[in-house]
Image: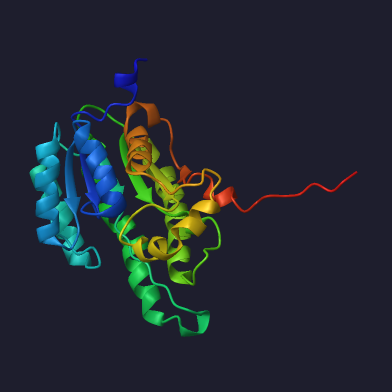
Amino acid sequence: MDIQSLFSVKGKVALITGGGSGIGLMIATGFVKNGAKVYITSRKAQVLERVASELTQMGPGQCVALACDLQSYEQTKKLASEVQRLEPQGINVLINNSGATWGENDIESYPDQAWTKLLTLNVQRVFTLTQLLIPSLEKAPGGGPASVINIGSIDGLKVPMLITPAYAASKAAVHHLTRVLAANLGERNITVNAIAPGPFQSHMMKATLDSMQDVIASRIPMKRIGSPEDMAAACIFLASRGGAYVNGAVIPVDGGSVIGNQQYTLPKL
């Protein structure tokens, strides 16, 4: 029942998609600094190699770069095969973080191709990669359960401020896909949960936060945007012994953003 046993990821093997920047980098940093071996993947090979080198130097864990364009089914299959080749004993953690967004100024101008791009990357590849890595997750070195963590969004829980219908719908789909996978994989000693982040400093949020950070923070009960520690800690919890009986949950990590506008004035009696 000690803290180190309950919340340790030391020696665990994790794959984090989109691990070279933003929320994925926050998570990767937290895992490496706590002794995990982390594979990070994205399209940008040079960025990945630099990040992997920097994180490995930080230690005490290790970080390895594996470039992959998850829009491509064939590249996703190759990624899964490479992970299985490099880690024949299995992996402990899969974090499906890669994603994209698409915003427009109004509903009328929202393009059809946005739906194809976002539903493929944000939803379909979450399923594809999880499906392909089930054999590796079932092995889970050191004993299970293995942990799949899908990164959703509070925009999948509430109507977003911006015109991003495909993004919001895709993240709501990620949340429900999480429940479906959890129901089917639990008996195979694999937990599946989702984190629904609020505003964090990331490439996806950069333009919005550059112009509206004060406004956004003012609508959050905690009056700030998320920090790297907030995100890393939530994932470490789910991947550790402490989160071993959490399955099928969608956990907002948002400072209360989802409830921030639900303020009611009681009528005078």
**Residue 56 image point, x, y percent:** 11, 40
**What residue do we see at 42% from left, 73% from top?**
103
In the image: residue 199, left or right of residue 98: right
Task: Give the farthest residue toward the top.
Answer: 1
Give whichever of 234, 194 is nearer the camera: 234
**What residue do we see at 29% from left, 53% from top?**
22
How many numbered circles does the render carry?
0
Task: Give the farthest residue toward the right.
Answer: 269
Which image quarter is the N terminus in? top left
In the image: residue 244, left or right of residue 265: left
**Residue 54 image point, x, y percent:** 12, 45
Which image quarter is the C terminus in? top right
**Residue 63 image point, x, y percent:** 13, 43
Query: Is residue 88 visible from the viewing direction of this image?
Result: no
Residue 148, placed above or below residue 35: below
In the image: residue 124, left or right of residue 86: right
Residue 42, placed above or below residue 63: below
**What residue do we see at 14% from left, 31% from top?**
60
Q: How is the image coloured?
A: rainbow
**Residue 161 image point, x, y percent:** 52, 65
Residue 224, placed above or below residue 215: above
In the image: residue 163, left or right of residue 20: right
Query: Is residue 71 visible from the viewing direction of this image?
Result: yes
